[in-house]
Image (cartoon, rainbow, N blue to C red):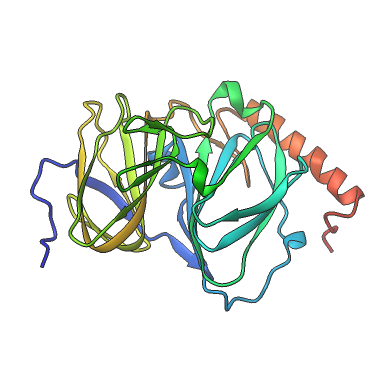
């Protein structure tokens, strides 16, 4: 039986949470709570659709964003997507949706049939991107490079580079077999580091179980983080230099200043009026 603590000089876990769950979606991190600690990673949902949920129409799920990029990693099943740039399609298991909302965009999505599992992350953008042009990339499983047990969703790791053009950071999906050990060495300057477990249990300075996110103590020295899988375990891991800006928050937007937020919200209102005019959105009654 594995011990509950890996005997190394690992960075300690200083925050952990299971967030709050509503139906198949657990809101683990929001910009108004642990997003302030994890920034530039400011939001994290863990979704597990069993296929028994009442179906939802994508037509009813349109919503806006500005100032951020959304990153959806599909671990099992598939999701449909559409955005106001005109792009639409399906992301299969192992694929990634990267949508840089920047100056403002609306999108919608829905889980495919059967079991669908994954994470949606929001990344706070730097000032030079937060009100810029919208950009998106929908990567297939074959597009995503692999280094040992890790798939490189964003940034670089172990000599491999993600095909997604993101601000400097690393975001990985890692699969470990029962008893397998793995050490993560953050890039220089990455003082923020965290993990969220999809299934299984991960042992680091203490255990992190399925449905939980854990944030490690800051480290400017680039200290490695060692893990052991207690049973077959799948998780996501993020690291980056801490976002140096305050978070100006809207309902679906995160910016670095009130002025930038007002510009982003003005653009998403303009797009929303267009969607109402063409019948894509229904007026509130």
Which quadrant holds the N terminus?
Answer: bottom left
Percent position of residue 201, x then y: 26, 62
Q: Residue furthest left?
A: 7
- The residue sitting at 78% across, 43% down in the picture is 86
**Is 266 situated left or right of 261 in this image?**
right
Percent position of residue 98, x then y: 57, 41
Q: Nearer the viewer, residue 202 or 65?
A: 202
- The residue sitting at 57% across, 74% down in the picture is 51
Q: Residue furthest bottom?
A: 52
- The residue sitting at 49% across, 47% down in the picture is 43
- The residue sitting at 69% across, 28% down in the picture is 133
Q: Which of 145 and 202 is in front in this view?
A: 145
Percent position of residue 156, x then y: 39, 31
Percent position of residue 237, x then y: 36, 45
**Is 158 situated left or right of 33 in this image?**
left
Q: How many marks?
A: 0
Q: Residue furthest front?
A: 142
Residue 189 appears in the rendering: yes
Residue 170 sits in quarter: top left
Q: Which residue lies furthest to the right in this view?
A: 277
**Is 172 situated left or right of 167 in this image?**
left
Residue 31 appears in the rendering: no
Residue 211 sits in quarter: bottom left
Which quadrant holds the C terminus?
Answer: bottom right
Vertical relation: 20 (above or below) 37? below
Vertical relation: 256 (above or below) 181? above
Q: Nearer the viewer, residue 279 or 17?
A: 279
């Amino acid at each position: 039986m594995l011990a509950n603590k890996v005997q190394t000089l690992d960075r300690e876990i200083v925050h952990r949470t299971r967030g709050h769950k509503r139906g198949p979606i657990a809101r683990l991190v929001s910009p108004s709570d642990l997003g302030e600690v994890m920034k530039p990673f400011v939001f994290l949902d863990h979704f597990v659709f069993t296929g028994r949920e009442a179906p939802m129409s994508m037509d009813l799920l349109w919503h806006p964003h500005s100032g951020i990029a959304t990153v959806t990693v599909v671990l099992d099943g598939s999701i449909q997507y559409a955005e106001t740039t005109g792009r639409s399609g399906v992301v299969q298991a192992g694929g990634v949706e990267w949508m840089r909302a920047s100056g403002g965009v609306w999108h919608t999505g829905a889980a495919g049939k059967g079991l669908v599992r994954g994470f949606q992350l929001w990344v706070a953008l730097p000032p030079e991107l937060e009100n810029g042009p919208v950009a998106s990339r929908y990567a297939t499983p074959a597009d995503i490079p692999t280094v040992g047990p890790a798939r490189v969703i964003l940034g670089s790791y172990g000599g491999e580079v993600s095909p997604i053009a993101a601000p400097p950071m690393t975001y990985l999906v890692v699969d470990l077999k029962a008893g397998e050990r793995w050490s993560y060495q953050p890039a220089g300057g990455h003082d923020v580091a965290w993990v969220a477990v999809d299934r299984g249990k991960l042992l680091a300075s203490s255990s992190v179980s399925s449905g939980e996110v854990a944030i490690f103590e800051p480290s400017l020295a680039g200290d490695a983080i060692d893990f052991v899988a207690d049973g077959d375990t799948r998780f996501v891991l993020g690291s980056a230099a801490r976002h140096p800006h305050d978070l100006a928050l809207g309902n679906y937007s995160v910016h670095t200043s009130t002025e930038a937020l007002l510009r982003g919200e003005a653009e998403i209102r303009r797009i929303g009026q267009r969607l109402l005019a063409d019948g894509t959105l229904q007026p509130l009654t």
